[in-house]
C-alpha cells in the first residue's frame, strides 16, 4: 500500500490531537507515514506517540531553518518528499500553519488543494462544510494527489500500535524560502484549559455576559466541564474577552462534542463557527433568540441565575 | 511605497448563501454581493501607510462584471485606482488557478507591498497570500494584527495558537491582515463622488498571456462532485427557567454523559 503522508503538528514536545486524528484517517487510505519538521531534537519525544497511532514510518527533517523562517522551508522539504515517495495522499491540519504549508505545496506541485476537510474516502472524495455550516460539499482533487487539510475534531483518534521506522530527510532550502524571518516567538500562558479548536467541550459567552468580569462565570463552567472558553464577536468587540477566543466568521471554527452558548443570540456569523458541534446547549433570556433553533437543549432564562446553579449542581455531582 | 490591495466580492455573509445547482459554483446571482469584510481592513491599512509614506494605492479584483460595484465601493474609501481582471472564462476557477491569474496581474503592477484580508468570508480558505508568494518569489507575512513599515522593512505581529510571533521581511512582500489590525473608515460623501472618476483598468486573460484552458472549470485543480443543504438542526427541548433552569441543564448534560 502506498504511503499517506501526515504532516505532524506539535507543540512543546507533544503531538497535537489533530495529528492523531489524521493518523487514524490515514490508516484507512494507505500506510500512515508521519512527517516531523522542526528544530534539532524535535522528533525524538514525538516518535512514540506517532507509532502508537499507527505511523509505520516517521520522516524526520530537523533544522533551525524551520524555526527561523515562516512555513516556506517546510513546504520546500515536503515538496521534495512528495516527489520522491509519490504518496497516496498528503494530510495536514486545517490550522493556520497547516493551511499555509499546503498553499505553498499546492503551487510547487501544481496540485489541487482541499481545506477544512472532515472526511476523506479511498476514492479521494473529501467532505467539507461551507457557508456557515449550511451546505455539505463533496469534492475531489482533479489534478495531482489528494492534498487536504483536515479540520480538528473531525474524527475520534484511535490507537493502532505500529513500529515506526525513522527516515532522516535532507533539509535543503533555497533563498526564496528564507524571506519571512521569525524574529520573536512569544508564548502566552494559557493555563490548564484545552486549546479552543481541539477541545471536546467549548463554553462560549456572548453580549449577554455583559462585561469582562462576568466572563469568570463562563470560565468557571468551562473548567467544570473540562472545556475551552470561547466568545462571540459581539463579546470580543465589546472587549469582554480576547480575540483569539472568538468563535465564528472572522474567528475560529470549532466542532466539539458539546458547545454551550451563554448569552449568545446566534447570529449567522456566530453559527458559522460552531454549527457542526455535536451537541449544542444554550442559555439566553430571549426566547426568540435564533440560537434556540440550533440548540439540542435550551434554557430561557437569566444566565446569571442559571449558570451558577448549574455550576453548583455539577460540583455536587462530582 | 506602491501598494496593491486585493479585494474580493463575496455574497453577504449575514444572509443565506448557496451553491448553484448547475455547476456547484458560488451562487452570486441571487446573492447580495459585497466587499469581503476583511478586505476593508486591508484597504484601511494601505491608506494609513500611504498617509505616512506616500505612494499609490491600487485595488486589484478578479471577478465577474458585477464586481465593479465593489471596486467603486473600495475606491470610495480613498485608493487611487483599480484593476479589474475580468474574463468569462475565469468562472469556476479554483484557488490554485486564481493565484496564477492574480500573480500575473500583480506582475503588471510593480507593487512594493500587496495587502489582502486574511480570509474571504465565502471560502474561508486563507491560502491566497502564500500561493501568491510562492509564485512571485516574495515574502508572505500572514495573519497580521499589527504591521509596521520602516523604509523597505516590514514587521508584523501575528496571533498563534501558543501566543504571538513577530515576523519580518523586506519589500516586495505580501501581507494579510485580520480584523484586529485597525478600524476601517467609512467612505465620505466626497470619497464616493471622487470614486466615480477614478481610473479602473480592465485586464482580460489575453492581456495577461494566460490561456482560457488554464483557468475556470477546465483548468481547475479540484472540483465539487456533489453539494447538498445540510439538514437544518432541529431545535431540541427548550425550558423556561422557573428557578430550576440550572438543575435541568445539568440533568440534560448528565443524560448525555457530559457530567
Image: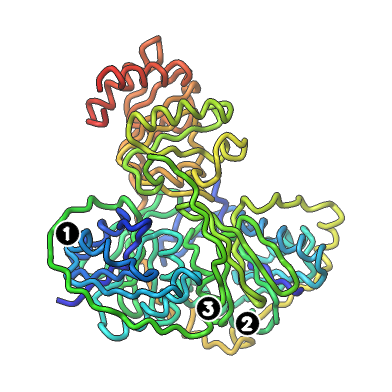
Cβ atoms at labels 1 and 2 below 8 Å apart: no
Q: Residue at x 54, y 59 (%)?
A: B165
The answer to whether residue B33 shows anywhere in this view is no
Cβ atoms at labels 3 and 2 below 8 Å apart: no
- Residue A315 at x, y = what percent? 31, 20
Horizontal side, residue B31 vs residue A138: left or right: right
Q: Chain of mark 2?
A: B
- Residue B81 at x, y = what percent? 77, 71
**Disc 1: which residue:** A52
Camera-near label (1 vs 2) is 1
The answer to which of A24 and A281 lies nearer the viewer is A24
Check disc 2 and report its element: helix, strand or loop.
loop
Q: Residues within 10 Å of mark 2 (few under 14, many from 20)?
A: some
The answer to which of B54 and A272 lies nearer the viewer is B54
The numbered disc on residue B204 is: 2
Q: Residue at x 51, y 49 (%)?
A: A251
> In the orientation shown, which residue stands out farthest toward the right?
B190
Amino acid at each position: 500500500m502506498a504511503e499517506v503522508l501526515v504532516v505532524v503538528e506539535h507543540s512543546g514536545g507533544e503531538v497535537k490531537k489533530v495529528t492523531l486524528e489524521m493518523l487514524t484517517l490515514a490508516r484507512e487510505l494507505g500506510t500512515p507515514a508521519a512527517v516531523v519538521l522542526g528544530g534539532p531534537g524535535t522528533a525524538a519525544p514525538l516518535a512514540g506517540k506517532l507509532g502508537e497511532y499507527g505511523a509505520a514510518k516517521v520522516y524526520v527533517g530537523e533544522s533551525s531553518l524551520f524555526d527561523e523562517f515562516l512555513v516556506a522551508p517546510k513546504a520546500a522539504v515536503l515538496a521534495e518528499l512528495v516527489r520522491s515517495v509519490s504518496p497516496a495522499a498528503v494530510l495536514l491540519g486545517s490550522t493556520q500553519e497547516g493551511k499555509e504549508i499546503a498553499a505553498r505545496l499546492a503551487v510547487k506541485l501544481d496540485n489541487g488543494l482541499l481545506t477544512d476537510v472532515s472526511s476523506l474516502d479511498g476514492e479521494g472524495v473529501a467532505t467539507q462544510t461551507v457557508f456557515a455550516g449550511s451546505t455539505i460539499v463533496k469534492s475531489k482533487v482533479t489534478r495531482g494527489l489528494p492534498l487536504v487539510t483536515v479540520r480538528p475534531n473531525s474524527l475520534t483518534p484511535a490507537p493502532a500500535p505500529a513500529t515506526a521506522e525513522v527516515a532522516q530527510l535532507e533539509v535543503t532550502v533555497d533563498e526564496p524560502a528564507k524571506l519571512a524571518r521569525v524574529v520573536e516567538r512569544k508564548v502566552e500562558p494559557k493555563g490548564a484549559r484545552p486549546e479552543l479548536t481541539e477541545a471536546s467541550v467549548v463554553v462560549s459567552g456572548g453580549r449577554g455576559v455583559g462585561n469582562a468580569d462576568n466572563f469568570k462565570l463562563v470560565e468557571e463552567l468551562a473548567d467544570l466541564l473540562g472545556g475551552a472558553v470561547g466568545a462571540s464577536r459581539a463579546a470580543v468587540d465589546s472587549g469582554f474577552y480576547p480575540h483569539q477566543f472568538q468563535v465564528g466568521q472572522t474567528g475560529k471554527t470549532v466542532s466539539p462534542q458539546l458547545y454551550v452558548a451563554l448569552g449568545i443570540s446566534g447570529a449567522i456569523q456566530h453559527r458559522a463557527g460552531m454549527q457542526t458541534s455535536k451537541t449544542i446547549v444554550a442559555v439566553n433570556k430571549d426566547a426568540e433568540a435564533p440560537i434556540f433553533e440550533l440548540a439540542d437543549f435550551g434554557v430561557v432564562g437569566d444566565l446569571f441565575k442559571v449558570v451558577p446553579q448549574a455550576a453548583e449542581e455539577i460540583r455536587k455531582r462530582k | 511605497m506602491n501598494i496593491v490591495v486585493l479585494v474580493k466580492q463575496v455574497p453577504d455573509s449575514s444572509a443565506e448563501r448557496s451553491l448553484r445547482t448547475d455547476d456547484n459554483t458560488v451562487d452570486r446571482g441571487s446573492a447580495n454581493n459585497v466587499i469581503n469584510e476583511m478586505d476593508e481592513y486591508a484597504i484601511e491599512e494601505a491608506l494609513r501607510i500611504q498617509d505616512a509614506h506616500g505612494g499609490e494605492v491600487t485595488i486589484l479584483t478578479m471577478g465577474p462584471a458585477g464586481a465593479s460595484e465593489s471596486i467603486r465601493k473600495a475606491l470610495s474609501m480613498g485608493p487611487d485606482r483599480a484593476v479589474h481582471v475580468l474574463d468569462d472564462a475565469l468562472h469556476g476557477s479554483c484557488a490554485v488557478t486564481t493565484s496564477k491569474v492574480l500573480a500575473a496581474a500583480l506582475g503588471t503592477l510593480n507593487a512594493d507591498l500587496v495587502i489582502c484580508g486574511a480570509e474571504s468570508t465565502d471560502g474561508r480558505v486563507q491560502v491566497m497570500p502564500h500561493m501568491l508568494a510562492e509564485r512571485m518569489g516574495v515574502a508572505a507575512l500572514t495573519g497580521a494584527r499589527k504591521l509596521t513599515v520602516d523604509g523597505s522593512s516590514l514587521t508584523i505581529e501575528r496571533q498563534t495558537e501558543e501566543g504571538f510571533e513577530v515576523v519580518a521581511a523586506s519589500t516586495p512582500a505580501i501581507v494579510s491582515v485580520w480584523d484586529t489590525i485597525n478600524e476601517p473608515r467609512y467612505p465620505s460623501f466626497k470619497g464616493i463622488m471622487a470614486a466615480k472618476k477614478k481610473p479602473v483598468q480592465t485586464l482580460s486573460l489575453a492581456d495577461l498571456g494566460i490561456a482560457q484552458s488554464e483557468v475556470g472549470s477546465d483548468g481547475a485543480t479540484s472540483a465539487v462532485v456533489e453539494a447538498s443543504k445540510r439538514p437544518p438542526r432541529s431545535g431540541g427541548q427548550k425550558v423556561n427557567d422557573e428557578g430550576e433552569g440550572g438543575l435541568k441543564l445539568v440533568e440534560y448534560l448528565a443524560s448525555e454523559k457530559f457530567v
